[in-house]
Structures are given as structure tokens and as C-alpha cells.
Image (spheres, helix red, strand yellow):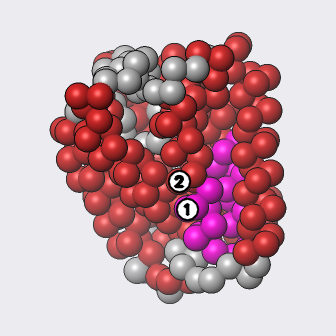
Amino acid sequence: MSPLAWWTAFVVAFASLSYAVRFTEGKPNPNVLYEWSTVANSLVQYAVIAAIVYAIAGLGARRQLLALRRPTSWWVALGVGVAIIIGMTVLTAVLGPVLHPGREQGVTPDVWRPSHAAAYVANGLVICIVAPIVEELTFRGLGYSLLERFGRWTAILLVGLAFGLAHGLVEALPFLVAFGAGLAYLRSKVNSVYPGMIVHGLFNAVALVVAVSGKPQQENMVRACASLWSFLPHF
């Protein structure tokens, strides 16, 4: 099998498993980010995903397929990154009140619990560092490189769709696809996954901070952002 066939099979299997879990087990515990077990489980899950992606990339020129290279322009990356954040904010403001993506995801805590601050910070480090690295390598790195032969915009759209489906959500799917496609566009403009990792990580970090800031008027944005934090929040 070719690298593209292996990557496609992996994404399809992962999306199928994610939706199966979602429809059979429902929403996860809203306090999951206050638990140390979440940190351990997430690290194991991301390690497995990273190993699979690394193995598939090894069937070709690994470093090239993963786009592990310096961006062609950090200024272009900055401009596109800001545009992604603005675009997601507008999309959330328009669709958030109708779709309620965070209500479906259900992983953002409702209140701040100081006694569990250490576990929350540890989960935050996984969400803001480990998750963006692995997800960007999986989709905007390997996935985009393998799909680029079909055309730039085809690759952007397919990567966005694959990223959205891999999360196993329905109401949040438009947000996830848009975010995934936006990051794929960033990857196409600067020929590197590094800027996407930074934007992805910052996006998740803002969501985690605002989630416990006690500002209800920001709930829709928080919930939409929180839905991006992990492939496997409910496993």
C-alpha cells in the first residue's frame, strides 16, 4: 500500500471509532480536565498516533512529508494566523448560538476548582503543546503532503474535512472543518507545519484560560475552541 492509502485508512478508521464512541457513550465528564488520569491517557494516545504517523511517513521522504522545515515567511504566517483566529471568531459568533458545539463536546469545566489546578495545568500543557504538534504532523504535515498532488485547494479542503471527522462530532463539525482547512491553507502558504502548531496551540490556550475565567458572555467561543483540543477526549 502507498503512504496515501495507509494515511487514508488510518483517518477513516479513526473517524469511525470516534463516532462510534460518541454515539454509544455520549458526552464525556465535564470535569475531565481536572483529572490526572486524563493526562496519562492523552499522552499514551498521542504517542500511539505519533508512532503511526511516523511509520507511514517513513514509507517516503519522512522529513519532507511531515513538512518539518523553516517557513518560507514568518510574516506571511503571522498574517494568515491572525486571519484564522478572526475567521473562527466570526464563525463562532454566527453559528455558535445555533449549533452549540461546546454543549456537544462537554469537556470544558463550568467552574474553576483551585484544588485541582495542577491537573488542569498539566492537561493544558498536553492540549496546548502535545496535541497541536501531533495533530499538525498528522493532517497539515503528512496528510497535506500526500494530498497536494490532487491540487492545492483539494488538499486544503480534504485535510479540513478529515480533521473535522476525526473528532467524532456532529454539531461542532463545521467549526472543526473550518479550523482544519484554515491551518491547511497556512501550511500551503509557508510550506511548513511549525506556524500551524503555534496557531493551534495558542487557540487552544485561549480556550482553556477563558473557560475558567468566569465570563459567561464568552461561553460560545470557549466551547467552540474547546472542541478542538483533542482527538480522543472521550476515550
| Quadrant (top left/top right/bottom left/bottom right) for the N terminus | bottom left
Which residues are the magenta region?
178-199
Q: Nearer the viewer, residue 60 or 209?
A: 209
| Quadrant (top left/top right/bottom left/bottom right) for the C terminus | top left
Seen at 43% across and 17% down, the residue is 110
Q: Residue 212 vs residue 189: left or right?
A: left
Q: Quadrant of residue 120?
A: top left
Q: Could you tell me if the residues under marks 1 and 2 are in contact, i.e. CB atoms within 8 Å?
A: yes
For label 2, the SS is helix
Q: Is residue 80 visible?
A: yes
Label 1 belongs to which residue? 197
Q: Is residue 170 visible?
A: no
Q: Which mark is residue 201?
A: 2
Q: Quadrant of residue 164?
A: top right
Q: Amino acid at mark 2?
A: Gly
Q: Nearer the viewer, residue 110 or 102?
A: 110
Task: Decide whether residue 181 is among the magenta residues.
Answer: yes
Residue 194, percent from left and from top:
58, 70
How many angstroms separate mark 1 from mark 2 (CA)?
A: 6 Å
Q: Is residue 117 above or below residue 203?
A: above
